Image (cartoon, helix red, strand yellow):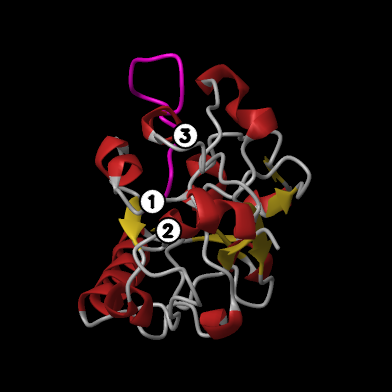
Amino acid sequence: MEELSRRELLKNAAAAGAALAVGGAMLRPAAAEASAIRPPGALEKDEFLSRCIRCGRCSDACPNQAIQMFTKANGAKFSMVPGPGEDSTPVIFPRQQACNLCQKVDGEYLRCTEACPTGALTKILRSEAASRVSMGKARIDKDLCYSFNHRCCGVCIRACPLQGTALKTGPHETPILDPDACVGCGLCERACIRYPQAITVTADA
């Protein structure tokens, strides 16, 4: 198996970055009908939308700056538009910035869930994130993935905060996904150097 050279890694990472800089309209080509990925602890859609007061406190509290308030402008970058009642609600676009489950910060709770004043985001202990967070599921396109096409990569595996459970290392660094363990944080998608990306996260239905 051929390993990706440093030059190739940088070249593909630069290509992905350039796409973001010009608006990223093609980063998630199948996302037009996708649901928004919500922060950890989000209630079921209707209950979430009724409780969320669009205050932005979860976004302000996020240590990784992963949470944005959903607008037509930022949604358009990913071929998404806010649905009825979704304007100015918190959303995560993993390819731009993913949730890191508050891995490197102090505190007992995931900060966005602690900051929510209405319960639209259920409070979640950092120590329970692996079992209680469910934002979405990762999906792998083996036709695009370098490691499934004779060029070892493994970047997504190393980015996964649940490495060894949600993403395991297969032969030649192929990512082996356990959807039951995946929490949908999007760090794998954010790390993917392929363009278009070979691993993407879609919201829970």
Q: Is residue 40 visible?
A: yes
Q: Image quadrant for the N terminus? A: bottom right
Q: Residues within 10 Å of mark 3 (few under 14, many from 20)?
A: many
Q: Residues within 10 Å of mark 1 (few under 14, many from 20)?
A: some
The image quarter in which residue 58 lies: top left
Label 1: which secondary element: loop
- Amino acid type, callout 3: Leu
Alpha-carbon span between mark 3 and mark 2: 15 Å
Query: Is 183 one of the magenta-colored residues?
Result: no
Residue that numbered label 2 is attached to: 91
Q: Nearer the viewer, mark 1 or mark 3?
A: 1
Instruction: Tell me if 82 is positioned left or right of 46 in this view.
Output: left
User: Which mark, by number, is residue 53?
Assistant: 1
103, 4: nearer the viewer:
103
- Looking at the rendering, the stretch of residues picked out in magenta corresponds to 97-110
Residue that numbered label 3 is attached to: 101
- Amino acid type, callout 1: Ile
Which mark is first along the chain, 3 or 1?
1
Q: Residue at x 60, y 68 (%)?
A: 145
Which mark is first along the chain, 2 or 3?
2
Q: Residue at x 29, y 63 (%)?
A: 10
Residue 18 position in % (x across, y down): 24, 76
- Amino acid type, callout 2: Val
